[in-house]
Amino acid sequence: MTRLLFVYGTLKRGCSNHGQLAGQTFVIEARTMPGFALFDFGGFPAIAAVEDDHEGVSGEIWEVDEAGMQRLDEFEGVPQGLYRRAPITLQPPAAGFAVETYFPAQSIAGRHRIGATWQE
């Protein structure tokens, strides 16, 4: 079984942690619906819902198999409560896809807002 995962930061192609997606399949570049922004978590971004966003967040959709998802959950600290994987809505042409992404488990309070795109 595979799942679709929206990546928006260091897991994207050309970024420092992209190797974590080895063996998985790139699907399409995508953007979330408005209402999401990226925040700086010290060298890597985290996505969060925000009321005043009108752009959404840019990223990529990857088809990830079960072993890959378990590896990514470990890497993202899901078992330790650092991140949680949850559904996110996307703009066309990916609007109909059932996609998940990693949200930070901790508050974004006091974090610098990056905006819509993470660039290393």
Image (cartoon, grey):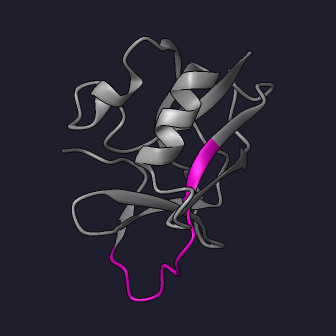
**Horizontal and vertical percent for residue 27?**
55, 13
Q: Residue at x 48, y 79 (%)?
A: 108
In this picture, residue 112 sits left or right of residue 35: left
- Check if residue 103 falls in the magenta segment: yes
Quadrant in the picture for the N terminus: top right
Total count of labels: 0
In this picture, residue 39 sits left or right of residue 24: left
Vertical arrangement, residue 40 with respect to residue 24, above or below = below
Secondary structure of the magenta portion, mostly?
Answer: loop
**Horizontal and vertical percent for residue 56?**
56, 50
The quarter of the displayed image where residue 14 is located: top left
Q: Nearer the viewer, residue 34 or 6?
A: 6
Q: Residue at x 68, y 35 (%)?
A: 91
Quadrant in the picture for the C terminus: top left
Vertical arrangement, residue 30 with respect to residue 84, above or below = above
Vertical arrangement, residue 19 with respect to residue 102, above or below = above
Q: Residue at x 36, y 58 (%)?
A: 45
The quarter of the displayed image where residue 89 is located: top right
Q: Residue at x 47, y 46 (%)?
A: 74
**Horizontal and vertical percent for residue 66?**
64, 23
- Check if residue 60 falls in the magenta segment: no
Q: Nearer the viewer, residue 5 or 23?
A: 23
The stretch in magenta equals: 101-112
**Horizontal and vertical percent for residue 37?**
50, 61
